[in-house]
Image: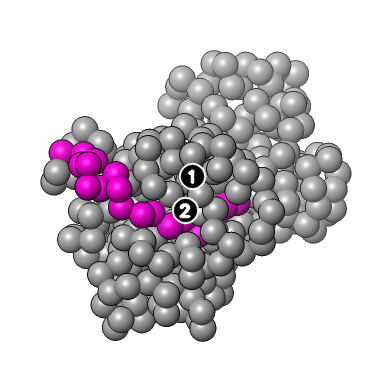
Amino acid sequence: MSKTTEKYDQGGLSEKSENVKIAYLGLGLMGEAMAVNLARAGLNVVGWNRTPGKPGEVALLTAGGKVARSLEDAVSGAGVIFTCLGDIEDVEQVLLKAGGVIECAAPGTVIADFSTIGPEAARRIFASLNSKGMHFLDAPVTGGDVGARNATLTIMVGGDEEPFQKALAYLEKVGKTIKRCGPSGSGQALKLCNQILCAVNMISVCEAFHLAKQLGVDENLVVDVLSAGAGGSWALTNLGPRIIKSDFAPGFALKHMLKDLRLVFENLDGKSDELPGTKLARELFKQVGENGDKAGGGANGARGTQAMSLAYD
């Protein structure tokens, strides 16, 4: 659902909701931008990062938010908690382990996780938090660093309707298209479908540039002309120019894509032969990630996903 098709049942942020404490856990590349947008909207945002002193803390403070020195301080008294972390173990460590959210937050708290962890993990976390009276939403996002900065992310939400409605007014401050996809795990399931689209599409973008080189066509025409046609895509429009410039700095890191594709097959019980295109994309990303730093973008998967083009050099 977009902002224009479904609104918070109060018609947006009320005076009461503006005073609700929001804890934001995980101030990395995506988390920083999203927390900053919440703070710039005039909300009471308290951030926390597992590794203190990161640039995201400074950015949040500059935007008018606060930074807590402990997870307990961040979530104490919070009505809504957002997390933007890494893999399954990171999310479970912050939410479920000793000293985590499950021990520090109050019953009734709405917890929405923006990480990509797959539907099985989301359902486990939902059950654990639900047993303590807390409400968990799996809410993975797509749109990259550009979408995070511009608050135009697509947010796919799994979980119960009531906590979704409570969180919606805040989600609208960081995303443009927000859709409740069904019960717990549904947001994660759709996100894995999205990652297949992104991964396999990157093959076509890289091969189109490779063919242009072989046929002596200006690579810029691939972006300028074809982006508006049937072969156009977000990756071609946004990552194509970076490929031409050999700019492999991460908007979305290759290592994170490899993690997401691992989750695809884990949640498919390892049946990789059912998704041959996705299997090829994973192999190409892995190849580039293992080749070291060829172009100044960082070794071992720290480059952006557009670095797949290096597999065609």
Closer to the camera in the image, 236 or 49: 49
Q: In which quadrant of the rendered image does the C terminus lie?
A: top right
Relative vertical location of residue 93 with respect to residue 156 in this rendering, above or below = below
Location of residue 8 in the rendering, given as x and y in whole percent from the top left corner: 19, 44
Q: In the rendering, which numbered label is found on residue 46? A: 2
The image shows residue 213, relative to residue 111, as above or below, that is above
Mark 1 highlights which residue? Answer: 65
Q: Is residue 169 left or right of residue 174?
A: left
Residue 84 screen position, x and y as percent = 50, 57
Left or right of 248, for residue 3: left
Say which element carries label 2: strand
Q: Is residue 15 magenta?
A: yes
Badge 1 marks a residue whose secondary structure is: loop
Seen at 41% across and 42% down, the residue is 38
Q: Residues within 10 Å of mark 2 (few under 14, many from 20)?
A: many
Image position of 283 (left or right of 6): right
What residue range appears in magenta? 11-28
Res 210 → quadrant: top right
Q: Which corner quadrant of the image does residue 279 belong to?
A: bottom right
Mark 2 in CB contact with mark 1 (< 8 angstroms): yes
Which of the two labelled residues, at mark 2 and mark 1, occupies the earlier sequence position?
A: 2
What's the amino acid at mark 2?
Answer: Val
Query: Is residue 27 on the magenta stretch?
Result: yes
Q: Position of residue 104 (x, y in %)?
A: 42, 75
Q: How is the image coloured?
A: one colour
**246 above or below 306?**
above
Where does the image place residue 137, in percent across and percent down from the top left?
Answer: 33, 63
* Residue located 69% across and 54% down the image: 53
Residue 201: mark: none
